[in-house]
Structure formats: structure tokens, C-alpha cells
Amino acid sequence: MVDSLLYDIGKVAIFTFVLASMFLTGLTVTIADLVAPFRNRRLVSISVVANFIIVPLIALILISIIPMSQELAAGLLLVSIAAGAPSTGKLAQLTGGEVARAVSLTILLTIITIIIMPFLVPFILEGAQADPLNVLASLVELILLPILIGTLIRSRSRSIAERLSPIVDIISNLSIAVIFLTFGVLFLARLGQIVTSTSGALAIFVAVVFTLLAMGVTYLLGGFERDARQDLAFGAGFRNITAALVVIFASFTNIQNDVLLMVLMVTIFSIIIIGIFVGIIFKKRMDAEKKARGSGA
């Protein structure tokens, strides 16, 4: 009974987080910002190749060499094709990257994800109950429309967007806290079972290896300025959990636990791993700024 209640609360929090985070993403960019990355065709090409070819290939290689259940493999494939994590802009801000470029690339990747995911999901998740067009409608309604509404507000009135952003940010942060609290309790309740079980240990191991490979290969692939390589690497390591969760919760009536387990493991460990890298880079930036201020005094 308690598990069912926590699950239902977590599900509501997920939809709230999706809507709030997508709306907040739109509030940070104008229409001009959205089209800016297309001037750098090489950057766009590398980003698309990295997220929709390289990262899924990494997932397929891991599935082929590491024995795992069909459900764990499906969860890994699902997150591998979900690109455009909304947190990429915040990471660019913390690491000294170009925020507008990171956000606009994120939106581009999100749009591509919305287009291709509905038609790939039936091949990934066995027993899918939803028609591809219904999946597409759910993704457009919960992800693309909030982004577009936020972008239009920003384009018409920057002051309104700036007033709305902190409120929406609070809602987004509170909802993600509820997600981690509810599913965290459910996860901890099963922690012993997860760690000691073959599937649980594999999910943790695969999530760590997948995230490190996605970041590393993408970083090496981008052979231009350093901050752009960082943005690409973090974007590839941080998958679009919002799109994956929309597909799972909005489009399927019978969710197998190991599919959701793998999605959550990739999410948790990507946050931990990328958080460490971002923390190191942010500290170096702060130290460099202090040193520059000291030498200029």
C-alpha cells in the first residue's frame, strides 16, 4: 500500500518536473537563440552524430558483451536514444560554457528525440501498448509545447520571462526532489536485493560504464574549442530522462521493473559522475577568477 502510494506520488512529480523543466528551458532562450547553432553546421553535425549514433552504439556494444536481461537492455537502449537533457544549459553556466548555445542545441536534440523515439520504442520495449503516433503526441504535449510556449514568452517579453523563471525553477527543483525522495525510498527498500541480485549489480555497473564512455567518446569526437567539447560531452552523458520517463509512464500500461531500474540507475549515476566533473571545473574557474582579481589589485 505504501509502495503504491509512493509510486503514484512519484509519477505525478515526474509529469510536474517534465512540464516545469521544459517550460523553464524555453524561458531561457529566444527564437534567435534557437537558430544560432545552425550557423555552425559542424557543431550541429557532431552533436547529432554523437547523441543519435555514437551513444546508441555504445549501448548496443555493452548489451552485446555484458550478459543482461531483456528488460535491462531495453531500459539502456531507451535512455541511449533520448537526447537533449534540459540540465545541459545549467552545466554550461557552471563550467563557463556558452549557455545559449548549450540550451539551443538541447532543444534541437529534444525535437529530434521526439520525432524518432515513438517509432523506435516498439522495437525496444516488448509488449508496448501504445501506437507510435500516441507516443509522439505525448512527447509533443509534455515536452515540445512547454518549450515553445516558454520561448515565445521570452521572445515577446524578457521581463516576464525573468519573473517567471525563478518560480518555475522552484517548482522544477521541488518536483525533482519529490522524485528522488519517492523513488529513492523505493530504491533503498530494495537496495539489498538490487545490490546482491545479478540484475541490480549489472544495472549499476552498466550505468557507470555507459555514462563514462558516452562522455569520453563524445569529448574526443569534438575536436574544436574546449568549452564546446565539454558541452557536447556533458550533453551526451546526461540523457534526456524526461523523454524516457514520458514514454514509460504515459505510453505503457504494463511497466516492467527492470526497465525503469536501468533508466533510474543511468540517471542517478550520470548525476554523480557529471557532478564530480562539473565540481572540479567550477572550482578551477573560481580559483582562476580569484587569482585574476588578486593579480589585478
Image (cartoon, grey):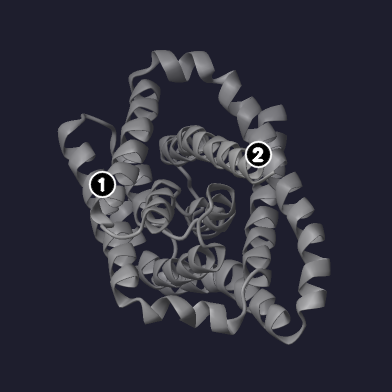
Which tag is nearer the camera, tag 1 or tag 2?
Answer: 2
Quarter of the image that includes the C terminus: top right
| Residue beneath disc 2 | 294
**Which comes sooner in the sequence, label 1 or label 2?**
1
Residue 157, quarter of the rendered image: bottom right
Residue 160, quarter of the rendered image: bottom right
> In the figure, is residue 6 to the left or right of 122?
right
x and y percent of residue 16 in the render? 70, 56
Given residues 208 and 194, the one toward you in this image is: 208
Which numbered marker is on residue 217?
1
x and y percent of residue 144 in the render? 56, 73
Helix, strand or loop for disc 2 = helix
> In the figure, is residue 185 to the left or right of 66?
right
**Are the residues at dot 1 and dot 2 in contact (C-beta closer than 8 Å)?**
no
Quarter of the image that includes the N terminus: top right
Q: Residues within 10 Å of mark 1 (few under 14, many from 20)?
A: some
Which numbered marker is on residue 243?
none
> In the figure, is residue 211 to the left or right of 3?
left
Against 82, residue 64 (above or below) is above
Can I make out residue 72 in this image?
no
Against 247, residue 39 (above or below) is below
Residue 74, quarter of the rendered image: top left
x and y percent of residue 271 in the render? 51, 38
x and y percent of residue 180 in the render? 64, 36
Can I make out residue 183 in this image?
yes
Given residues 47 and 10, the one toward you in this image is: 47
Residue at image position (53%, 65%) is 103
The three-letter code of the residue at mark 1 reads Val
